[in-house]
Structures are given as C-alpha cells and as structure tokens.
Image (cartoon, grey):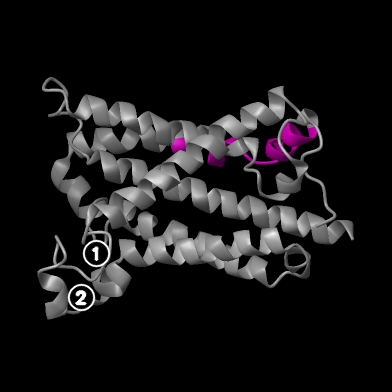
Amino acid sequence: MNCEFISDPEQYQAESQASSRLWNLWLPLTAFCLVPFLAWFSPVFFEKWFASETHGLLEFLHFFLPLIAALIGLRLTFSSHIRSDPLVLYWCAAMFLGGIYLAGEEASWGQHYFNWATPDAWLNANDQQETNLHNISNLLDQLPRAILVAGIVFTGMIVPWVLLKRPGFLPSRFNFIYPPLALFPLATLMSACWIYRALNKSTELKSYLVYRPGEFQELFIVWFLCYYAFFLLWRERRCRNQT
C-alpha cells in the first residue's frame, strides 16, 4: 500500500487525537472500576444482567465485540487498497477468522442463544457440557488467550512507546497495521487485570473481588480487538481518499 500513516511521532500522535477520549480512555477506565464494584455490591443483580451467558451484558460483549472485529476484517479484505498488499490482506483475513472463532466460542457457536442440546460426543469431552472447543483442554483455552495477551502487551504498549521514542527503529513495512496510540489505555487496563487476579487470590480481598479474573480480562481483550479493527477501517478509508 502506498499510504503512510506513521512517518514520525507527531503524525502517530495526531492520528489518535482525532479519537474521543470518552471511548479510548474514560469509558474503559469506568468499566474497570465499576464492573468489580457491581459484582460485589449486588451479586444477584450482576449475575442476572451482566454475567449471565444468555442475556448478560458482559457475556454479550464478549461475543459481540469480536464479531464486529471479524466483520470489519471481512469488509477490509474486499478493499482494492488492502488487496494490493498481500501482507495486509492476510492480516485482515486473520482478523476475520480470529474474530469469528472468538465470537463463536464465546456463544458456544449459538448454543447460548438457541439452547440446543449438547451432542453426546461432546458431553464427556467438554468440561461444561457445551459445544465449544476451549472447554475441552487447556491447550485450546489458555494457549490462545496467552498469545492474545502477549500480542496486546507488545503491540498495544511496547510498540507505541518505540514509535514515539525511537522513530525509525521499527520497519515501516508494517505501518498500516501498527496499533494506534489510542489503544494504549485498553492495553494497560488489560494488563492491570493481572493485579486484579493477584488480589483476587488473597484471603483479605477475595470476598470483595468476586467477578472472575479471566472474564474480567477478556472484556478488555475483545474491546482492544474491536477498537483496533475500527482504526484499520479508518486508515483504509483515508487511504482511499488520498488516491
């Protein structure tokens, strides 16, 4: 692709300044503080309206946000500008497939919403007797999560620092797919969930931090992925407008 988006630190910062801080900072920060509080303050209300697999808001977001990222990835694969660069095309295709997998697994491929019976072959193999893969083994659950978490820490926290402090150090070949600076707060909050996990294990705080750490971290993982997809879509539109 012939469009440049990160030629110097000033340009890299300017890209994210167009994004409202309400969406990339204050709303995620509010969620980080409010979700554990609600889970402690009103466990019954929280379990019914936030954590329920069938109609809980957080569980729905765990499904909906990666689905949006997948649809954006699919849309980008049809762009002539994206298709002119095989690397970017494969990246967008991977975003589509990965988003579909995350959304499908979160909803047990529709079972949470359509309530079909789990096939007999899955009943013994699946820890929760659902039609998904991530409850079959830790390899299909913890490994993909670890890859996502490591990728978000690297691309959402380390890469922005390098682009700002060491311009020219990272190859310009990947300029289109480097995450914007606006995603730094989400990557930081996702990493801060490790602190939540550690505090959750302590005897003194366990009764207050009742929301599952893994589910809490997953919220910021899918939030990051969805917001990143929107930025790629915005970059693609800018590229079209420049030609």
Labelled pair 1, 2 in contact (Cβ < 8 Å): yes
Relative to 188, 107 lies left or right: left
Relative to 241, 65 lies left or right: left
Amino acid carrying label 2: it is Asn
* Residue at 19% from the left image edge and 68% from the top image edge: 130
Q: Position of residue 220 (x, y in %)?
A: 42, 43
Tell which of 82 and 224 is nearer to you.
82
What whole-number distance in Å separates the C-alpha atoms at marks 1 and 2? 9 Å
Tell which of 50 and 143 is nearer to you.
143
Q: Quadrant of residue 200?
A: top left
Q: Which residues are magenta?
A: 11-28
* Residue at 31% from the left image edge and 26% from the top image edge: 195
| Label 1: how many Cα within 10 Å (few below 14, some 14–19, many 20+) | some
On screen, residue 195 above or below 219 = above
In magenta segment, residue 18? yes
Q: Quadrant of residue 202?
A: top left
Task: In the rendered structure, find residue 115 and report the number of the disc placed on it.
Answer: 2
Q: Is residue 182 visible?
A: yes
Task: In the rendered structure, find residue 77 and report the number of the disc placed on it.
Answer: none
Q: Position of residue 198 (x, y in %)?
A: 25, 26
* Residue at 67% from the left image edge and 64% from the top image edge: 89
| Label 2: how many Cα within 10 Å (few below 14, some 14–19, many 20+) | few
Q: SS for tag 2? A: loop
Task: In the rendered structure, find residue 54 and report the number of the disc placed on it.
Answer: 1
On screen, residue 112 above or below 221 = below
Quarter of the image for the N terminus: give it.
bottom right
Q: Position of residue 192 (x, y in %)?
A: 38, 29
In magenta segment, residue 23? yes
On screen, residue 29 above or below 63 = above
* Residue at 70% from the left image edge and 31% from the top image edge: 163
Tell which of 47 and 75 is nearer to you.
75
